[in-house]
Image: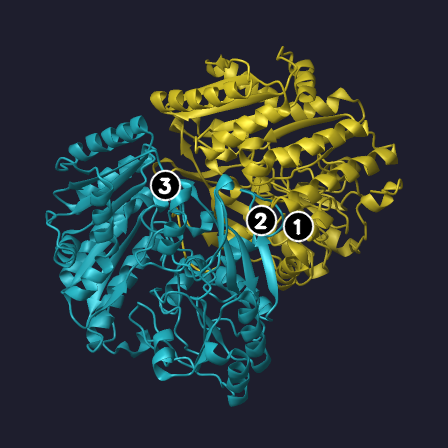
Chain colours: A cyan, B yellow
Amino acid sequence: MNAPTDAAHLLPQVRLRPVPQEFLQALEARFGAQYSASQAVREQHGRDEGSLQAPAPSAVVFAESTQDVADAVRLASQYEVPVIPYGAGSSLEGHLLAIQGGISIDVSRMNRILSVNADDLTVTVQPGITRKQLNEAIKDTGLFFPIDPGADASIGGMSSTRASGTNAVRYGTMRENVLALEVVTASGEVIRTGTRAKKSAAGYDLTRLLVGSEGTLGIFTEVTVRLYPLPEAVSAAICSFPSIEAAVRTVIQTIQLGVPIARVELIDANSVRMVNAHSKLTLREEPLLLMEFHGSPAGVQEQAETVQELAKEWGGQSFEWATTPEERTRLWTARHNAYFAAVQSRPGCRAISTDTCVPISRLADALLDSVKEADDSGIPYFLVGHVGDGNFHFGYLIDPNIPEERVKAEALNHKLVERTIQLGGTCTGEHGIGVHKMGFLLEETGAGAVDMMRTIKQALDPKNILNPGKIFAQ
Amino acid sequence: MNAPTDAAHLLPQVRLRPVPQEFLQALEARFGAQYSASQAVREQHGRDEGSLQAPAPSAVVFAESTQDVADAVRLASQYEVPVIPYGAGSSLEGHLLAIQGGISIDVSRMNRILSVNADDLTVTVQPGITRKQLNEAIKDTGLFFPIDPGADASIGGMSSTRASGTNAVRYGTMRENVLALEVVTASGEVIRTGTRAKKSAAGYDLTRLLVGSEGTLGIFTEVTVRLYPLPEAVSAAICSFPSIEAAVRTVIQTIQLGVPIARVELIDANSVRMVNAHSKLTLREEPLLLMEFHGSPAGVQEQAETVQELAKEWGGQSFEWATTPEERTRLWTARHNAYFAAVQSRPGCRAISTDTCVPISRLADALLDSVKEADDSGIPYFLVGHVGDGNFHFGYLIDPNIPEERVKAEALNHKLVERTIQLGGTCTGEHGIGVHKMGFLLEETGAGAVDMMRTIKQALDPKNILNPGKIFAQ
């Protein structure tokens, strides 16, 4: 591939739309202390954890109720100004960038639990609550919410990007776990989708359409999600392997056998090194699988024995068990911090994260050639993966001041995505499209499906004010 | 409730649109022997298994390829004629009724398996294959497709109505199990949605929007679904209870404990009587639960013991086990035939089927008052339910020639739906809206959400030719 060495074409296309002073004055009049146009606040709300940048939004509204969100959107609609919902700021693909200008609606103060229905295994929350806050608040119910992206993201944001994480192999993603929504539409109207029933055939599945729509079709103001009984028994294990391939082959067979493993994470030797440094651990600096089994005591033992046998065949070192909750928490915290550990390993760097997901049988095919390409590139990188789902992330640690590094990293990413699409997979398993992967979406799904998305967007948001310029060109 | 005794307002509002002769001639010229305008064929394609009727479509095209479907839709678009996709004809809510006239596109000849990817637990099929044909064809792979509505429905139809069935409590519904689609849009264009990857965050979830859209947004020409390893051990059991309440309370506790039961069906005493007569069985004519456990031998035993203890507390008679595959098949066949057994129990009757689904803790509240109301009504009825999901069906067996019976049955249905909505549930767990439940959808979800559905429909099908008049008024 003859990649251009100029990285400008890889940066977001900024096209600022007018934000009338009259609009900002009306916002300030309505929201008072909940309104801010200070530079620090605006800048904080105009970026995410990804590698891309754009000018900050013109102002930030700190919504404290559905009515606040509806009023802000109604004003924005009147003046045709873009609005970008903001939760925890942890998205990775430029979702929060104000590339067409406008304002940010911060919902992080809307972080209440509205109702716990423990008997039905559901909870209804405001969108700004984070996944850790939610689990902390329900810990006495004997239930938990399993979806765990790396960051302590907000439930609203996780719904918007169709997030998943380490538990998805067993418990599904936000797609499977959001039951109902309250949504502010582009005109500022408040609608409800879904119910607390576990299944439904009642008309179009608006809930599933909105989950993953990245703030482009509506702003979530209530989210009802499924909860799960805390498993009777949990055991976690680490197993090192002589190669990435050996680890991956073990995982493929585990899934094909139907073992209901709760978590199975690949961590490459680079990541182990970074995690050891960041989290003061002494893990063997070899590719490893971090696993967790949930169930009855007998069930957990049965699952673990099956996987242990498979691992042995592929040369896995004997399992090390984490039996106490504290040990388990330490291991999983280390895993969740892998991204931050990696970014800290190269001061000043930004991570360009890949997010491909393939059918399980193609996992080795998708991964191994890309490892070789990454090794050959000379760009520092780490590799972690929710490999039980066929999903993994290379993080290319680029110096944002060296355009050639961005070009090289994006070329690696592009090659990986092309390979993934050929293997029947997707360019993004859980991070979403944002502004970063718009080209990949088109390659993956074809113009027909993207046109259908655009037609829906134009119909539901004719003034194109809801997080415009994300997912596809608008 | 002072219900009117005139049933006319309960019948579908027929508003026939013109079907130009020129269009029919063009269709016949294109499709030759694959085209039929014979009365018998038209009438067969203008009805479903529900209780409603409408004039037959003007012609039927027997599509044999995606190209056939696309060509038929393109012609229909040119002449603005409605098209109604037809699979096995087993829907229940008037989905197939040509209430605005038009033609039927029968896809039952498109019944090939396109690719079995056993290593990935997926299969791609044409839409006309039925669930039994699919399972027969893959039986040597060690995998199975679990979704089983009562009828031997087509995979395309099941996708269109977001069907589920007895296994959904463990394996989910078509919502969770359709991974990707090939779809002919309203303009006759062919698009693809989704991939074979298990999860994805790639833009709007068009697959989930289309699943359950009842033929109103596109016609499916390929469907990729998930498969599951045949469980190592299976055991089925029947348990009789002194009351419906006792049976239901057992189920509620089973689900709340997180027991991964594969099937748990309630069959009331009326249904048992009808099933005994139809399937030559001698089941105790009391409310019973029909259960199945999937897993490892130890896992299955553990699950069964837990449920047995719960059942005992509620006065359940000792479990009778069906240990051989033949015995299990006989029991489940009897369950699947309950609908047909019931309809045959009153010659000439039609069944009006309810389909509410509530959060599991509200199952008894939703069910017991409705049982009393049905008993008091004097209308013969049966009650069966996928109660592990909170979903159950009353079938009111009405004489279609006695309008008062339809009025009475619909009043019972309406009361049940009102109660369900108050309890946080949905008017349809798996049958869909069709023409029959349009009023209920509006009550359940409110005008805002239905307006959003209508906006999407109008944007994607501006000529309103795809199964018009279904789900909401168009």
* Mark 2 in CB contact with mark 1 (< 8 angstroms): yes
Circle 2 packing at 10 Å, graded few (<14), some (14-19), many (20+), is many
Residue A80 seen: yes
| Residue occupying the point 78% across, 39% down | B410
Q: Where residue A3 appears, x then y in whole percent?
A: 25, 71
The subunit letter for the residue under badge 2 reads A
Q: Position of residue B335 (x, y in %)?
A: 60, 23
List the residue tagged with mark 3: A170
Are both tags, 3 and 2, on one chain?
yes
Q: Chain of mark 1?
A: B
Give B351 or B32, whichever is nearer the viewer: B351
Q: In the rendered image of this protein, does residue B122 appear above or below residue B27?
A: above
- Quarter-of-image position of residue B423: top right
Residue behind mark 2: A195
Q: Which residue is mark 1?
A: B444
Badge 3, how many Cα within 10 Å: few under 14, some, many 20+? some
Residue A78's x, y, as percent? 59, 80
Q: Point out the tag, 3 or 2, that comes first from the N-terminus.
A: 3
**Crowding near the residue tagged with mark 1, few <14, some 14–19, many ≥20 C-alpha atoms within 10 Å:** many
Q: CA distance from mark 2 to mark 1?
A: 9 Å
